[in-house]
Amino acid sequence: MDTTLILTLIFVYLIAYLFGSIPFALIVGKVFYKTDIRNFGSGNLGGTNAGRVLGKVAGVTVAFLDLFKAFLVMWVAIMFLPDYPGYVAFAGVFAAIGHCYPIFAQFRGGKAVSTAFGYLLGVSVFLVNQNLIWVLFFLPIVIGLTTLKITKYVSFSAMLSVTFTVILSFFVQSNLTISLALVIIDILLIYRHRSNIQRLMDGTERKVSWM
């Protein structure tokens, strides 16, 4: 690996982490609602807690902003690394890490749900056959929303839909690095939901009422 590529990777991954660190839930809460959502609900800086604390509009807005920041990271990465799709895939991992552990919010972030879907959108548009967007992006959204409609558990719906897509990715596209990056994001997502998993097992997990 030559020096230029190494420096490019450092730059791209640093940008990915910093952009992933933008706490949109905190910004939306403070600017439009004069509320620091870290002090309410679960305290997480994600769309679910924003919706629970601030309402449906805020929750959906934060979810979309978090999704598109991951997508934009992939777009920046492909511009700098057009011949290295595997390295581009890992830009999404750094965006997810930034979202979960944001340097701009004392490393207290979200749980990587929207970031995971932003990664899937970026992969579908930039790294694989764009026809796969229906399989790698829209299908897991349908699965997640359907499960959410039935169960009202955001945590379970997110983990189910992303894990399903991890498994599916190994069969519908041939770039192993893309699937491995998605595995890492899924592991991060599940780890961040470990308290939710315990509450699901105990039957005490909170259901959403704003969706």
Image (cartoon, rainbow, N blue to C red):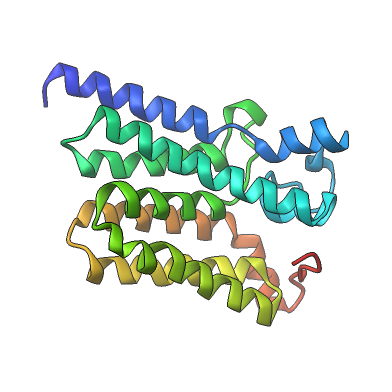
Residue 50 in view in this figure: no
Q: In this view, does 112 lie to the left or right of 38?
A: left
Residue at screen point 63% across, 50% down:
63
Q: Quadrant of the rendered structure where residue 74 is?
A: top left
Q: Position of residue 43 (x, y in %)?
A: 76, 47
Residue 134, compared with residue 106, is above or below; it is below
Viewer-nearest residue: 117 or 194? 117
Viewer-nearest residue: 123 or 104? 123
Q: In which quarter of the image is the N terminus?
A: top left
Q: In this view, does 62 lie to the left or right of 102?
A: right
Residue at screen point 84% across, 42% down:
39
Mark count: 0
Residue 198, compared with residue 18, is above or below; it is below
Q: Where is residue 46 in the image (x, y as percent from the top left)?
A: 66, 48
Viewer-nearest residue: 193 or 27? 27
Residue 56 in view in this figure: yes
Q: In which quarter of the image is the C terminus?
A: bottom right
Q: Where is residue 102 in the image (x, y as percent from the top left)?
A: 58, 33
Q: In this view, does 99 lie to the left or right of 30?
A: left
Q: Position of residue 45 (x, y in %)?
A: 69, 44
Q: Which residue lies furthest to the left in this view?
A: 2
